[in-house]
Image (cartoon, rainbow, N blue to C red):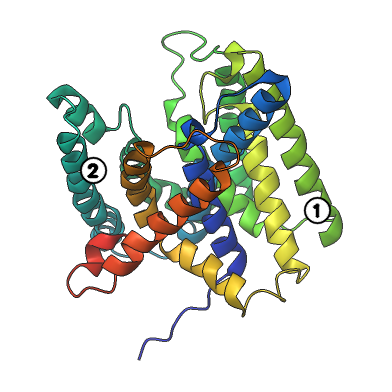
C-alpha cells in the first residue's frame, strides 16, 4: 500500500507565493492613473516583486526532481509530460475560446498558443526543461556538489553576460547547454540541499538582505529603463532575488517560524494555493481578461480587484478538480 508523502511546507509556501507573484505581473492595468514619482516607484516595485514567480517555480521543480532514481526514462517523461500537457490543452482551449469571443484575430490566437503575447510561454519552457532534466539528473547523481558548482558557475557567468547583453561573445563560442532557464532547477536543487557553515538564523537574514538588495537594484534599473534588464528572467538581479527568497523561506521553516500557521486556516490556504498553482497559472488569464472589462482604474479598489482575481483564479481549477474525469485536466 502506498503511503502519502509528507508535504514540505516551505515548498508549498514558495509555490503559493510564486503563483501570486505571477498574477502580480499581469494586473498592472488595474491600478488607477499613476501620478508622481512615489506612485510610479510603488507600482514598479509591486510589479517587479512578481518577477520572482517563474524562477521560484523552476527552482522548486529542480529541488523535487533532481538526484532521484529514474530507472525507466520513458516512464519519467510520460509522468512529467502528462502532468503538464493535459492541463495545458484544456486551459488553452478555454483561453483561445475567450479570445475568439472578444474577436481577436487568428494571428493573435496562434501567437497565444505558442506563447508569444501571453503567459503560455512558460509551458513551452517546461517542455524544454523536462526533456533535458534526465541528462541533468544523471550528471547531478554522478558528480554531486562539485558538479553542481561547475554547472552553476558557468550558468552564472552567462547570466552576467546576458544581463549586459554580451552573450554570445562570438558566434562559435556556444554555451547554450548551460544557458537560459535550465539553470534555475539546478540552483533550486543546490539551495535545497546545501548545508551552510553559519547558523540558520544568519542564513535566513542573509537571504532576506539578498532579496531586498537585489529587488532594489532591479527596481532602480527598471525605473531608469536600463538596457541591462532586457532579459526579464535571465539577469543577475533576478537570480539573486530568487536565491534570496528561497533561502529566506527555507530557513524560516528550519527555524520553525511557520509552526503556528501550518495547521490552521492560513496554512491550509497556502497548501491549497500551492496544489492549485499550475491550474491557476492558466485560469488567471481568463479571470484577468474578463475583469479587465470591469476595471475601476482606482488605487483604492485595486486591493479588492487583486484579491478577487486570486480567489477566482484559485476557485476555477479547485472546482474543476472535484468533477469526475476533469481533475486530470484541471492542473491539480
Which residue bears the numbered disc 1?
203
The secondary structure type at the circle numbered 2 is helix
Task: Give whichever of discs 1 and 2 has the lower sequence position.
Answer: 2
Q: What percent of the width, then of the height, locates residue 5?
A: 47, 78
What x and y, as percent, mark residue 66?
48, 56
Q: Quadrant of the N terminus?
A: bottom left
Whether residue 235 is situated above or below residue 7 in the rendered picture: above
Q: Name the spot of residue 25 as percent of width and height, x first.
A: 50, 36
For image coordinates 62% across by 31% down, the residue present is 43
Crowd rating for badge 2 (residues with CA inside 10 Å; few <14, some 14–19, many 20+):
many
Residue placed farthest to the bottom in the image? 1
The residue where tag 2 is placed is 95
Rendering coords of residue 200 (x, y %): 82, 61
- Give the image quarter of residue 210: top right
Seen in the picture, residue 238 relative to 275 is either above or below; the reply is: above
137 and 331: which is toward the camera: 331
Residue sitting at 44 percent across and 47 percent down?
A: 136
Residue 251 shown left or right of residue 169 in the figure: right
- The residue furthest top is 170
Q: Of helix, strand and loop, which one carries label 1? A: helix
Seen from the viewer's position, the closer of residues 226 and 39 is 39
Q: Nearer the viewer, residue 225 or 31?
A: 31
Is residue 249 shown to the viewer in this render? Answer: yes
**Spatial separation of the CA atoms under disc 1 and disc 2:** 42 Å
Amino acid at each position: 500500500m502506498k503511503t502519502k508523502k509528507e508535504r514540505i511546507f516551505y515548498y508549498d509556501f514558495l509555490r503559493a507565493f510564486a503563483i501570486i507573484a505571477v498574477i502580480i505581473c499581469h494586473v498592472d492595468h488595474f491600478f488607477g492613473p499613476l501620478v508622481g514619482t512615489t506612485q510610479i516607484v510603488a507600482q514598479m516595485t509591486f510589479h517587479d516583486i512578481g518577477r520572482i514567480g517563474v524562477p521560484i517555480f523552476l527552482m522548486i521543480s529542480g529541488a523535487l526532481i533532481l538526484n532521484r532514481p529514474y530507472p525507466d526514462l520513458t516512464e519519467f517523461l510520460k509522468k512529467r509530460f502528462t502532468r503538464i500537457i493535459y492541463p495545458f490543452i484544456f486551459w488553452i482551449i478555454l483561453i483561445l475560446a475567450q479570445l475568439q469571443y472578444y474577436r481577436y484575430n487568428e494571428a493573435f490566437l496562434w501567437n497565444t498558443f505558442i506563447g508569444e503575447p501571453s503567459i503560455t510561454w512558460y509551458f513551452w519552457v517546461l517542455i524544454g526543461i523536462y526533456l533535458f532534466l534526465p541528462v541533468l539528473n544523471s550528471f547531478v547523481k554522478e558528480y554531486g556538489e562539485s558538479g553542481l558548482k561547475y554547472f552553476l558557475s558557468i550558468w552564472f557567468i552567462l547570466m552576467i553576460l546576458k544581463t549586459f547583453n554580451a552573450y554570445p561573445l562570438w558566434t562559435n563560442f556556444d554555451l547554450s547547454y548551460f544557458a537560459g532557464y535550465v539553470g534555475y532547477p539546478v540552483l533550486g536543487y543546490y539551495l535545497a540541499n546545501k548545508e551552510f557553515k553559519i547558523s540558520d538564523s544568519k542564513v535566513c537574514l542573509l537571504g532576506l538582505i539578498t532579496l531586498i538588495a537585489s529587488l532594489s537594484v532591479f527596481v532602480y534599473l527598471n525605473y531608469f529603463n536600463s538596457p541591462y534588464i532586457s532579459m526579464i528572467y535571465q539577469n543577475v538581479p533576478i537570480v539573486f532575488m530568487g536565491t534570496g527568497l528561497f533561502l529566506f523561506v527555507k530557513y524560516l521553516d528550519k527555524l520553525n517560524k511557520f509552526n503556528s500557521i501550518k495547521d490552521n486556516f492560513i496554512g491550509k490556504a497556502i497548501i491549497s494555493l500551492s496544489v492549485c498553482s499550475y491550474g491557476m497559472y492558466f485560469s488567471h488569464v481568463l479571470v484577468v481578461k474578463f475583469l479587465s472589462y470591469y476595471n475601476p482604474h482606482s488605487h483604492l479598489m485595486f486591493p479588492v480587484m487583486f484579491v478577487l482575481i486570486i480567489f477566482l483564479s484559485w476557485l476555477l481549477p479547485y472546482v474543476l478538480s472535484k468533477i469526475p474525469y476533469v481533475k486530470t485536466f484541471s492542473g491539480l
